[in-house]
Image: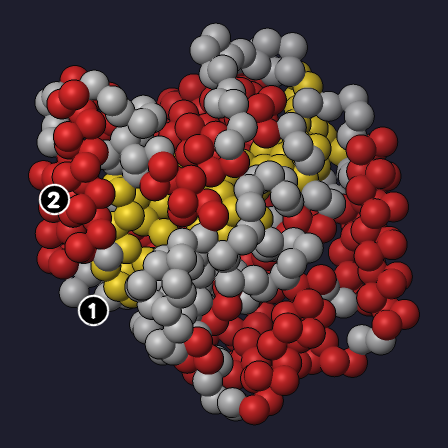
Amino acid sequence: MTALELGHLIGEGSIDPTELAQYFLDRIKKHDPERRIYVRLSEERALSEAKAAAVRAKNGTRLSPLDGVPISWKDLFDTAGIATEAGTRLFEGRIPAKDAECLTRASRAGLVCLGKTNMPDIAFSGIGVNPWTGTGPNPFDREIERVPGGSSAGAALSIAEGLAPAAIGSDTAGSVRIPAAWCGVTGLKTTYGQISLEGAVPLSYTQDTIGPLTRDIADANILYSILSGRPVADLSGASLKGVRILRATSQFDALSDPAIIEQVKKGLSLLEAAGAVVTEGPVKAFDDVIALSAKHGSPAAIEACMMYGDQIRANRGCMYEPIEERILAADKFTAVDAAALYRGMEALISDYLDQTAGYDLVVGPTQPEHPPAIAPLLQSVEAYLKATMMSISLTRLANLLRLCATTLPCGRESGFPVGLMLMSPGDTEGKLLRLSAAAETALKPINA
């Protein structure tokens, strides 16, 4: 069930929040005994919050439509009195004194905190592999353990495996959308600055964004409103009639498996049948921003090196080696590189808006390939890095150009889910969510 469906039944008195929380806690213990999805539970807090929600439900003082609904939290959101280690031995035993601001907002809306979900070291990986905690396998291959996607790996798995109705993750170069797409769920990458980063362990202070992973857009919508403090978007009557959609060819066609492109086109044909006008063509800003980053560095690497470089050097081996090396490699970039990178991105954000001004949405596959097997990536640094760069190759475009984006399930190819990524200019979450809701309805036949 979706979070909103559970919330509605709590309001009706059909579901007791305490029993609901215990149901999920019991499922987690049974189905995730190795703690590869949840690195730790916040059982005492969850049951306390659920009991309070039960009282409010009985006396008619519910705090929000999701009051009493339990959700999971990525292990980079500070949780008072509970270890928050951001997936790295570098922060082993780190116990914050207070909650992250977004967790505080969720608690004030009556949401129940089930626990902290798995992630790679400081969220610096799009595949979700973590050698310290183990890696929860992708649910779409029960024979070969494949990556779930990252860095919000446990967040996506908590939904896909029925261990939470919704999850909160973060997205610096795709870390909400990648695992959402590979695990067959919905993800929202918010615009930088829409949701406070206070109390979230940083990777990139100019690229980090917070967003929900959910079963549908309606849940993403209400969670975005709760975490940001902004009004909930009106999804009623959402339509694609006359909506102008550009299927971007730049980057997407060159990097994606042709079979995945074909699956996306099948999805777009359903959007056309619902009234959308779909065209395809290049977006020069996509090519230009990748070239800019290749020449002058990525903001995430440069900023992570600035924040953690000395700590990593003083504690070698406390972070997965390929991630250490990716961060420390940013040392080679100069102050001139950093200035060129940030000035260049600002110019390209403007270029992108000019180049796509005639469209309501720009779309493409969320992931260019299906999830790779885990074992070979742990045996070869080269294979690990290649897979990591593949995973962020399309999603990072939205971060570098300050866009908001969703990923929606778009059927399956070779048995694996395909994600359709919908992108909109920064700070247009309301429009994006409304159009995504309409697209979600149109895509139902392909997801049946």
Q: Which residue is mark 1?
A: 34
Horizontally, residue 37 falls left or right of residue 377, namely left
359 w.r.t. 201: above or below: above
Can see residue 40? yes
Q: Which residue is mark 2?
A: 23
Horizontally, residue 16 falls left or right of residue 414, namely left
Q: Secondary structure at mark 2?
A: helix
423 w.r.t. 178: above or below: above
Of mark 2 and mark 1, the one earlier in the sequence is 2
- The residue mark sitting in front, 2 or 1, is 2
Position in image of residue 299 (x %, y %)? 71, 62
The answer to whether the residues at label 2 and label 1 have Cβ atoms under 8 Å apart is: no
Position in image of residue 391 (x %, y %)? 55, 58
Residue sitting at x 51%, y 73%: 384
Position in image of residue 296 (x %, y %)? 82, 67
Quarter of the image for the N terminus: give it. top left
> Closer to the camera, 34 or 308?
308
